[in-house]
Amino acid sequence: MDPNSEPLPSLPTTDEIRACTNNLWETQCYKVVALNDDVVVKFGGGINTWEGQALNYLERHVPAVPAPRLYAMYYESKQLFLVMSRAPGVPLNTIWSSLADSEKGDIVAKLQSIFDTMRKAECLWPDFYGSLDGGGVHHYLFWNQHERGDRSDHQKILGPYTGELAFVAGLVGNYRASVERNKQPDYKARYYEKYPPQVLQGHRPTLTHGDVQQKNIMVAESQDRRNDQGGRSFDVVLIDWENSGWFPDFWEFFTASDPFIFQWDEDWSSRVQEFIRVFPVETAMMQIFDRDLAMFG
């Protein structure tokens, strides 16, 4: 049975959500709590409606991609509440080191199937680069450097863009704006305006998760299925879609190989390359660009 055709569970009240002490994740800006085995809620002032809209888009247009189902989304007291289905199992990072090679291979094979499905998905809008709700580009490199302000404001996100050239121009233009705002010489801005457009070309808009970390991959052991070598087999669900959108096809590996979270001395660095296509030149260019823009904040 299609899980999205099943009736909605009984949804919690706002008071029940706030009183819940079963915290799955917490930051200064938001909290994720599990009300029961079926329902989780992400709420706070640091989340945005486009995350909920991304789940709606996936359920409606790419249902083969396993993601949480959005049951409700609403504001109360300036906090956004996303009431979602609870992905079964545990985050992959909590068990990865204990898995046998055949079990890791089983999970990677599932991820390869998922990302193949995402790569084949067709965008509803021609040559579109932006979020799944049709809005701007939800990545910190597109936080508007032309204006200072609250970055949670939808107006502070650049995009969307029509065409790859416009996407790259928006990226490079944002770097120049940062340089000018900080009253720095523009020599490197000129370099980026000339050379990245020569490298970052020939890439079509691709459905992108945008934050492929082990903590965002939920795995649940199958009770009635074994892998090809007789070991445990797992079901896989991707969570945390706030950075998703239609990006150039090199973007998934660029974000997945973020040097702040990616450890090249761990086997995960090799396994990622089995289910996400690697673009070494584009990734190297983007990592340098990322570092330089971060210098200005």
Image (tube, rainbow, N blue to C red):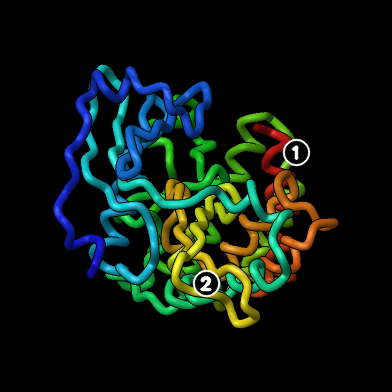
User: In the depicted view, which residue is nearer to us: 116 or 198?
Assistant: 116
Mark 2, secondary structure of its residue: helix
- Tell me, for residue 100, which label it has, or none: none
Q: Is residue 213 above or below residue 178?
A: below
State the residue position of label 1. Answer: 185
Q: First in sequence: mark 1 or mark 2?
A: 2
Q: Label 2 sits on what residue type?
A: Lys
Q: Amino acid at mark 1?
A: Pro
Visible in this render: residue 278? no
Q: Residues within 10 Å of mark 1 (few under 14, many from 20)?
A: few
Farthest left residue?
7
Specify the farthest residue to the bottom: 228
Residue contact between numbered discs 1 and 2, judged by CB atoms under 8 Å: no
Binning the other alpha carbons within 10 Å of mark 2 as few (below 14), some (14 to 19) or many (20 upward) gives: some
Q: Please report the residue visible at 33 percent of the width from the left and 51 percent of the height from the top.
A: 135
Query: Residue 170: where, in percent of width, then height?
Result: 51, 53
Please provide percent x and percent y for residue 8. 17, 48
Q: Which residue is mark 2?
A: 110
- Residue 82, by quadrant, is top left
* Residue 101 location (% of width, % of height): 72, 70
